[in-house]
């Protein structure tokens, strides 16, 4: 495989807080998307998504490609228990999504809401629960604007995000559950095989693996970035065109962290 370009940037433009990661070896290309924390607990001085990303990245340095999702999930569970000193409620556990290319089997494996592009065709993994929460957040923000609130005030306090926090806690019950609101995520509590997505590729295919920090993948990094920046310029709160569960916080460069890798198989 031949790496064409890769890019990693945190929403705060600080590598020490970026919860996304990229891992490249002779046999794998992997994008990791650490889940945004819903609480204030720190893990070895970092947010839970950063902790999960680092655990998985270090595990990838040691594991072979066989049964890799299970190995990563076990490594995350063991690291969480070791750091916390006990089993925690699911809502408190560090989590991550992952998408990886296995150069031995010529297969892409996705578990969670990362995305890929194969020979110009995009494959998204948006969660139904995110669409629901995005709609609710948009409703609240539109209401606040009608009440005369300033855009700057909404960006600072984000009452739409506050309105969905209870839902964000409740959705943990649907992690790795097959069903209408179920979704895949590495949380240290086991893998649901029916939620694994697989895509076969062949030598010469062009592939992009990315986290969901880009709302739409273009043909390359420049196209993907141009689309993102145009949307952020028009909708920095990310509740109209982007319709996200969070917007761009004051001082940040985007609404989410970004990991992107384009390569030829």
Image: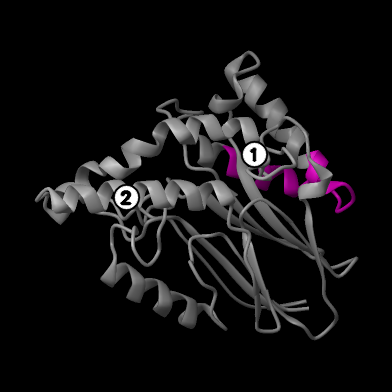
Q: Quadrant of the N terminus?
A: bottom right
Residue 56 in magenta stretch? yes
223 left or right of 185 in image: left
Q: Secondary structure at mark 1?
A: helix
Rendered position, 49 above or below 78: below
Residue tagged by mark 1? 55
Q: Quadrant of the C terminus?
A: bottom right
Q: Nearer the viewer, residue 93 or 157?
A: 157
State which region is magenta.
52-71
Q: Secondary structure at mark 2?
A: helix
258 left or right of 97 in image: left
Q: Nearer the viewer, residue 9 or 205?
A: 205
**How many labels, in total?**
2
Q: Quadrant of residue 186?
A: top right
Residue 50 in magenta stretch? no
Query: Crowding at label 2, few (<14), some or many (≥20) Cα neighbours within 10 Å?
Result: some
110 left or right of 11 in image: right
- Coordinates of residue 32 in the picture (x, y in percent): 62, 53
The residue sitting at 72% across, 26% down in the picture is 78
Point out the tag, 1 or 2, that comes first from the N-terminus.
1
Q: Nearer the viewer, residue 150 or 8?
A: 150
- Coordinates of residue 154 in the picture (x, y in percent): 20, 48
Residue tagged by mark 2? 139
Q: Is residue 259 visible?
A: yes
Q: Quadrant of residue 244?
A: bottom left
């Amino acid at each position: 495989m031949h790496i064409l370009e890769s890019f990693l940037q945190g929403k705060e433009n600080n590598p020490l807080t970026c919860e996304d990661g990229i891992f490249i070896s002779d046999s794998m290309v992997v994008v990791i998307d650490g889940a945004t924390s819903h609480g204030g607990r720190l893990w070895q001085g970092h947010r839970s998504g950063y902790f999960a990303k680092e655990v998985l990245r270090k595990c990838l340095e040691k594991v072979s490609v066989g049964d890799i999702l299970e190995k990563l999930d076990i490594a995350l569970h063991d690291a969480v228990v070791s750091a916390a000193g006990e089993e925690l409620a699911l809502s408190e556990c560090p989590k991550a999504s992952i998408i990886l290319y296995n150069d031995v089997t010529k297969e892409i494996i996705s578990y969670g809401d990362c995305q890929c592009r194969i020979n110009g065709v995009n494959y998204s993994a948006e969660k139904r629960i995110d669409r629901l929460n995005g709609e609710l957040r948009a409703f609240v923000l539109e209401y606040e604007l009608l009440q005369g609130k300033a855009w700057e005030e909404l960006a600072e306090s984000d009452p739409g995000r506050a309105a969905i926090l209870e839902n964000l806690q409740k959705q943990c019950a649907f992690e790795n559950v097959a069903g209408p609101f179920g979704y895949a995520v590495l949380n240290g509590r086991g893998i649901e095989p029916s939620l694994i997505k697989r895509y076969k590729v062949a030598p010469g295919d062009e592939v992009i693996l990315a986290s969901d920090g880009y709302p739409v993948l273009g043909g390359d990094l420049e196209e993907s970035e141009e689309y993102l920046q145009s949307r952020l310029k028009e909708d920095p709160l990310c509740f109209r065109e982007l319709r996200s569960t969070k917007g761009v916080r004051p001082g940040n460069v985007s609404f989410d962290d970004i990991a992107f890798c384009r390569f030829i198989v």
